Amino acid sequence: MRVEEKYAGIFYDDKVLTWSKRLLTLPGLWPEDRNDFRFFFYVIYVILFTSLELVGLFQSINDLDKTLRNVTLSLPTILIVLKALMFRWKMHLVLPILKIVRRDISQGLYRTDKEREKIVWYNVAATMFTTSSAMSLFFVPTLFYGKPIFECILSGFDNCTLPYELPIRINHIYEVTDARKYALFCIWLIPASTLLTVGATGADSLLVTLTFYLCGQLSILGNRLKNVNLEMGKYHCEMKHLIDRHDELLRLATILKNAFSFLMFVQTLGLICSLCVVAYQLLTTSENGKDMNTVHFVLYSCAVVLLAFCYCFLGECLIEESSAIDLACYFTNWYELPTKEIRSMMFCIARSRRPSYITAGQFYVFSLETFAIIMKASMAYLSVLRTIA
């Protein structure tokens, strides 16, 4: 597994936590530097924004198409508020993991070139997830703001009438009647997009970063177990260190699971509902021939599906790396050791038979198999929605 140096240079974060810290510091949610004032301001701002969206949702409750459209916009912001509150509730659990990550960085994350490849791959994957998800989540609402203008440009301004429709019911506060006012309100809403993007990606970025960090360290542990020095004078001390490291990584994985379990449960329900509603709107707009709406919902659908796949792929990596420790122990020359020394090897094998994993609500395990379940559930709800409509 090799990573091109040019990509590693761009996306590799030698401090591991840089991007997560940037995203979570703005709303005051960085566990090592909690700021209640910034968090209070952030939550109040997002709640007010969400309330204005809900006004539009209740006012269009008799129109199914408008209701689903408002649900598409209001559901993510509701999830962001819930995720922020849940992460604020559980973020103290992450502190021991951050402490150990900083200790490992100071001591060196790898020793050999092979170990470096593993670390770089997982590190770059975490950074790319954070940057790509933040950009896509910022781009989708921005596209929605400018959709009427794009429609006029594509039509060549022939018989073009702008609806001046914003994602929140701002018309009840100040009437938007021309392009200048519409553009000004779009600019005014840019901070809302930024704060919503931070809320949607901050906690997820920390989860992805820490999980991939654990995957990299488990992979390195497996490599060191395969190459453990079997000389009797050195084996016992080195093996004891590796067993202690294995126990520490498993303990960190358990802490990570407990810290993000309820948050991921809410996120999973939101993904299923969002995918269902957006898929229904995509089918409706494609049948009506509304090209710009179709493009918007295709991008939205792709973003939701990609996010669900990333979570499941993340869980699959952790399961695979934690399960691979028993094979690493087996492929050593354990048969050259006395029976007494083999017991320590058996301890690692027994612990790795129960892999570490990420859960949603303590019962929903994220894996590639789970991704298929999420897609099936979304399509099942889509069928019900089409039947009702």
Image (cartoon, rainbow, N blue to C red):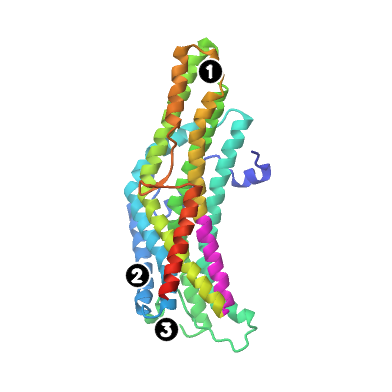
Task: Judge depth for marks 2 and 1 and give the one in front.
Answer: 1
Q: Quadrant of residue 175?
A: bottom left
Q: Magenta stretch containing residue 306, yes or no?
A: yes
Q: Which mark is residue 334?
A: 1
How would you rate the neighbour count of disc 3 (Cα within 10 Å): few for under 14, some for 14-19, many for 20 or more?
few
How would you rate the neighbour count of disc 1 (Cα within 10 Å): few for under 14, some for 14-19, many for 20 or more?
some
Q: Earlier in the sequence, mark 1 or mark 3?
A: 3
Which image quadrant: the N terminus? Answer: top right
Q: Which residue is mark 3?
A: 175
Left or right: 250 in relation to 155: left
Residue 14: where, in percent of width, then height?
55, 39
Q: CA distance from mark 2 to mark 1?
A: 63 Å
Residue type at the position of mark 3 = Glu
Residue 326: where, in percent of width, then height?
50, 28
Q: CA distance from mark 1 to mark 3?
A: 77 Å
Name the residue: 35% across, 60% down. 43
Name the residue: 55% across, 20% down. 228
Residue closest to the eye, 340 or 383:
383
Name the residue: 33% across, 58% down. 40
SS at badge 3: loop
Q: Magenta stretch containing residue 235, yes or no?
A: no
Q: Which mark is residue 51?
A: 2
Residue type at the position of mark 1 = Trp
Number of callouts in the render? 3
User: Magenta span: helix, strand or loop, mainly?
Assistant: helix
Q: Which residues are magenta?
A: 289-307
